[in-house]
Image: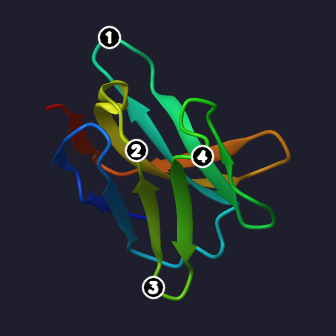
Amino acid sequence: QVQLVESGGGLVQPGGSLRLSCAASKSIASFAAVGWYRQTPGKERELVGRFPTDGSAVYADSVKGRFAISRDNAKNTVSLQMNSLKPEDTADYYCNLRSYLTSVRYIDYWGQGTQVTVSS
């Protein structure tokens, strides 16, 4: 088990930047991937980006070039830098760690979420 705590959400104007952080209660180095998802009321949670341990980060088309995930294995933290924010980026953002049981079965761990509102 691992506990995840997100921080850094808030209100920002369109075009602004925000940095979300996620602190894990144990080492993140053993997890196959770290990532961020977001969700708005009435919609399914969607992938923002994922950073596998053995590869490069991948992003949803809607945030590509504006958002960047970073991971610090020494500090057990995962961050999401969000630039050029748009009103449609408004959502609850969730940190995610993924652990694979087999090649196709995995367990996802989630934080409690942090709210981001982009509005003038």
**Is residue 30 in sight in this rendering?**
yes
Secondary structure of the residue carrying tag 2 is loop
User: What whole-number distance in Å separates the C-alpha atoms at marks 4 and 1?
Assistant: 27 Å
**Is any part of residue 4 visible from this angle?**
no
Q: What residue type is labelled 3?
A: Lys
Q: Earlier in the sequence, mark 4 or mark 3?
A: 4
- Mark pair 2, 1: CA separation: 25 Å
- In the image, 112 versus 14, the foreground residue is 14
Q: Can you say whether 4 is above or below 117 in the image?
A: below
Q: Name the residue at 82% across, 49% down.
A: 102
- Cα distance between the residues tagged 1 and 3: 35 Å
Name the residue tied to disc 2.
84
Residue 13 appears at what percent x and percent y?
Answer: 20, 40
Say which residue label 3 marks. 75
Residue under numbered circle 4 = 65
Nearer-the-camera pick, 112 or 114: 114
**Residue at numbered disc 1:** 42
Question: Between disc 4 and disc 1, whose residue precedes?
Answer: 1
In this view, which residue lies farthest toward the top? 42
* Secondary structure of the residue carrying numbered label 4: loop
Residue 110 position, x and y percent, is 42, 48
Which is more foreground, mark 4 or mark 1? 4
* Picture coordinates of residue 25, whole percent (x, y): 38, 74
Which three-letter amino acid code belongs to the residue tagged 2? Answer: Ser
Looking at the image, residue 1 sits to the left or right of residue 18; the answer is: right
> Which numbered mark, 4 or 3, is in the foreground of this view?
4
